[in-house]
Amino acid sequence: MRKLVGLFIVTFTVLMISALPRAEAIGIEGHYLHAFAFQDNDLKDTSGWGGSLIFPLVAGVKIDLGGDWLQPEIKNSGNAKITMIPVTAVLRAGIDLELVYLYAGAGIGYSFNDSETPESMKAAGLKADLNDEVFYCGLLGLEVGLVDTLAVRGEFRYNLMRPDFKVTGPGVSEKDEIKADHIQIRLGLALGF
């Protein structure tokens, strides 16, 4: 798995560097996100935020290198939460019409995860942990230019995430996959230079 992630990082770095001389507008983007419809019904809907660097390759094709932060609560756990910090590389392709850019894309990422231990587990001397993981995403979006260097971006994204949840303690060592697949609606501002 580490070789796959390493190969992915090298490939996107080469693509990014080769795009720099032709880039029309390299940019940065910041966004609010709402994550909902988690496949595992034990996770509550949540809001978060994130940002990305945007590298245009050719007309209508862009690479986004970004990261997010979200913290869904675990239902019936005394307000315990999991923290997810997904870092992604996404290839977007679409139609660039004057001030409007319609696109679809897909990407791969690595999520840095952590979990709070619910009070009921702490009382039993147990500790919970959520493993980091590689994940995939698909997306559809719309970018509307306000001026030459500023755009509003709306995006629908589906993340396929399956981290392992581990419980350890005296005489206990269990691991179970959490189905953290979910939908995100994002709204952000992109600034080009």
Image: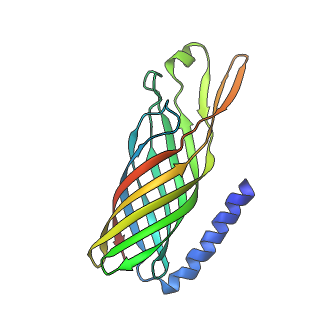
Residue at the spot 42% in from the left edge and 83% down from the top edge: 24
Residue at the spot 37% in from the left edge and 73% down from the top edge: 101
Direction from residue 155 to residue 130 in the image, left or right: right
Residue at the spot 51% in from the left edge and 86% down from the top edge: 21
Question: From what the image shows, is residue 105 above or below residue 163?
Answer: below
Residue at the spot 56% in from the left edge and 61% down from the top edge: 107
Direction from residue 88 to residue 30 in the image, left or right: left
Question: From what the image shows, is residue 157 above or below residue 179?
Answer: below
Exactly how many numbered labels are in the figure?
0
Spot the residue most to the top: 124
Direction from residue 148 to residue 138 in the image, left or right: right
Say which quarter of the image contains residue 129: top right
Q: As rendered, which of 83 and 183 lies closer to the eye?
A: 183
Say which quarter of the image contains residue 100: bottom left
From the image, which quarter does the C terminus lie in? bottom left
Spot the residue most to the left: 146
Say which quarter of the image contains residue 186: bottom left
Q: As rendered, which of 42 and 172 lies closer to the eye?
A: 42
Residue 43 at x, y percent in the picture: 47, 33
Residue 134 at x, y percent in the picture: 63, 51
Residue 155 at x, y percent in the picture: 39, 59
